[in-house]
Amino acid sequence: MLKDTYFQIMQKTFQRKKTKTCCTTSFYRCFFLTLQPGMRYFIWFSYDGTRYHGWQRQPSGHSVQAEMEQAMATLLRQPVDLTAAGRTDAGVHARQMAAHFDYCGTYDISNLAYKLNRLLPQDISIDRVEPVADALHARFSATKRTYRYFVHVGKDPFLRHYSLELHYKPDFTLMNEAAATLLAVSDFAAFCKSGSDVKTTLCNVTHAEWLPAGATGNAWYFEISANRFLRNMVRAVVGTLLEVGRHRMTVSEFRSVIESGRRTMAGESMPAHALFLESVEYPATGSDVLTTEETE
């Protein structure tokens, strides 16, 4: 009885929206597609976050998610709900981001990346779209995320949009000594944005290091990998490490900041424009096609 009622509602809705070219066969096709669970797909993409209020859809404000979902709905002719590997903040970029969506229509997915790139703005690029196992989740199945934060010493007109300009040369050797501490701890509450709605502040950091970004010695980046990240965590870590690099904080004091669990003890949060989500990694199991590469 309930199924018949739902069927009748769907039929009336379809009849109100149908055009002269629609027919009964089209209705039955649309109706049964709504009952199918669909196939899960992963979409791999990158974006320049300068113009956006972050990845996540916003009530007011331009987001990468809204831009992509609108373009995909246009091509697939049905609403699309994207679930991403993480939620980058306003102004943060992604060299590699993954998201999943479920689709049960007849569109040729092999052409979706090409068509989306023609439809989307220049600051969003789709790498590929591929089917995955139904159980694979873009956010919860990810095993590692890697971020990079870029800095340069002195004025450089070609780096200013994607790297933080420093008016001093920090002690990168000392900062790497402090960064090694991050691998020995698990609670990063001291680097979590105040008021964040998180169930736990535990993270497993597996890599944290400052590396030169070129041969000149004036450009560097901080690379950090973990199973998950807290909101604003990377930028807060970078700001605190720079305090060490300026000899305003010792390595021992840096560890004390972490152990305190207090955001007020850590350094300031660095600007978003120099932060990149570099990669997201998933387990390679069975028929999963994902063999390569949350929030900040």
Image: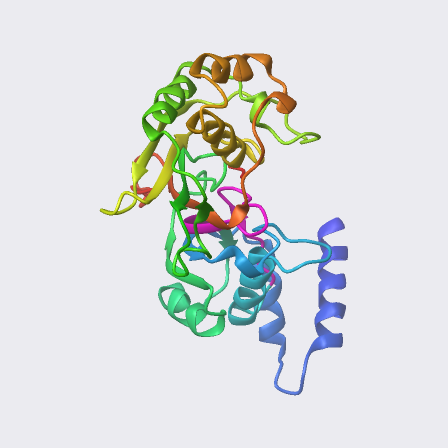
The location of residue 155, given as percent across then percent down, is: 42, 54
Position of 201 with respect to 247 (left or right) is: right
Answer with the quarter of the image where residue 269 lies. top right
* Visible residue check, residue 281: no
Q: How is the image coloured?
A: rainbow
Please tell me whether residue 285 is drawn above or below residue 71 in the rendered image. above
Of the pair 220 and 204, the residue shown nearer to us:
220
The location of residue 149, given as percent across then percent down, is: 42, 41
Of the pair 191 and 65, the residue shown nearer to us:
191
Segment tinted magenta in the rendering:
79-100
Answer with the quarter of the image where residue 21 lies. bottom right
Which residue is farthest bottom?
A: 20
Q: Residue at x 72, y 68 (%)?
A: 11
Q: How many marks?
A: 0
Q: Residue at x 55, y 52 (%)?
A: 91
Q: Residue at x 60, y 50 (%)?
A: 56
Of the pair 20 and 75, the residue shown nearer to us:
75
Answer with the quarter of the image where residue 174 lies. top left
| Residue 146 is one of the magenta-drawn residues | no
The location of residue 68, given as percent across then percent down, is: 53, 61
Please tell me whether residue 35 is drawn above or below residue 194 in the rendered image. below
Position of 204 with respect to 27 (left or right) is: left
Please tell me whether residue 138 is drawn above or below residue 24 in the rendered image. above
